[in-house]
Image (cartoon, rainbow, N blue to C red):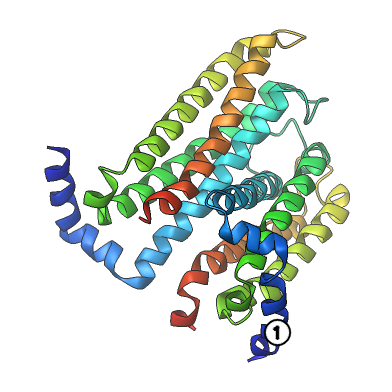
Amino acid sequence: MIGYSLIPFGHWLQNRGFALAIADSGWAYPFVQATHFSGISLWLGTNFAVDVSLLGFGNKRQTPAQLSDALFVWNWLGFALAVLGGLLLFSVSAETFVINPAFLVKLGILIPAALITHIVIQCKIHSWGKEPQVTAAGKRAGSLELLLWFCVATAAVLIPYGPLVF
Amino acid sequence: MLLQIADRLQDNSIIVALTSTGWTAAGLAILHYYSMFVLVGSMAIVDLRVLGVVGYGYSVGDFSRRMFPWVWISLAVNLVSGFIMFAGDATAYVPTHSFQLKLLVVLVATILSMIVQWRILRWEQTTVLPAGAKILAAISLLFWVGSILMGVEVPAISGIG
């Protein structure tokens, strides 16, 4: 499996000073987890709002394009927080994570696919969602993004089950 | 008394079926986490709008009418999935102080969200939001982030979950 070739990197990473400090501290790990989850909440909450508006739900006074513009900064701020918290969590047990199938599927396939869909939506939303009536392509993209981020969350929850389910 | 109820709940055949099978237990966890992300994210957008740091060109009423249905739907999914997860190990959760504190934080956060939604009807009539609105939104945001923190502290402190 591809993950086994990453074990030396995982070993190196989890023996860095910051990773050892988080692992050895009694309180740091839950705070890093909470940072990761707060970032995901902001990221997923803002994505969810835009995607469901592309699908035609919610009030029609704001177009999906206007909503996406209004949430843009907080959307990416949430992503940055999620990535920062995620990297720190990863570094604590990197050797275990790199051989976990659920983690590899999440990071190697699902997140890139969901992220590309998200960026395409942000680039195209001014043509798909400038009116309250969204084009069919916009609706398809919104549905796809909702599905992909749900799959990312599913893979994340399955990480502890990883070696058992794959 | 509470422990007796917890014991009965834990032995309920439906609860046992839902929480002891790997895939159903994982499905509950997926629903619980995903709904928590949507819930806290949606409520954060409303609170940040009241604080004036997001969507300044749009009214608080527009934002709240868009976000609050998702807040309550995701809260309902979160509560139902959370209750079933709790019920599967109820005798361990009931006496755990960190779990009791988590429930209290979620309850306060929910009440604060209800107050924000109720007050927004009045706030949207005014051109400038009162300072009290911003204080309430900041406290609400703090409690929702606190509920996430308490959610991760329960297994960290007690080893349950």
Q: Is residue A117 above or below residue A163?
A: above
Q: Is residue B57 above or below residue A73?
A: above
Q: In the image, what residue type sits under mark 1?
A: Pro
Across and down, in percent, residue B91 comes to 21, 50
Task: State which quadrant residue B124 falls in.
Answer: top right
Residue at left offset 81%, top offset 25%: B56
- Tell whether A127 sits left or right of A138: right
The residue at which mark 1 appears reads as A8
Q: Is residue B141 above or below residue A99?
A: above
Residue at left offset 69%, top offset 26%: B62
Q: Is residue B35 above or below residue A106?
A: above
Task: State which quadrant residue A86 falls in.
Answer: bottom right
Image quadrant in which the C terminus of chain B is located: bottom left
Across and down, in percent, residue A50 comes to 71, 46
Image quadrant in which the N terminus of chain B is located: top left
Question: Can residue B64 be seen by looking at this rendering?
Answer: yes
Q: Nearer the viewer, residue B32 or A57?
A: B32
Question: Can residue A65 be seen by looking at this rendering?
Answer: no
Across and down, in percent, residue B28 comes to 40, 59
- Tell whether B104 sits left or right of B73: left
Across and down, in percent, residue A139 comes to 71, 56
Image mark 1: chain:
A
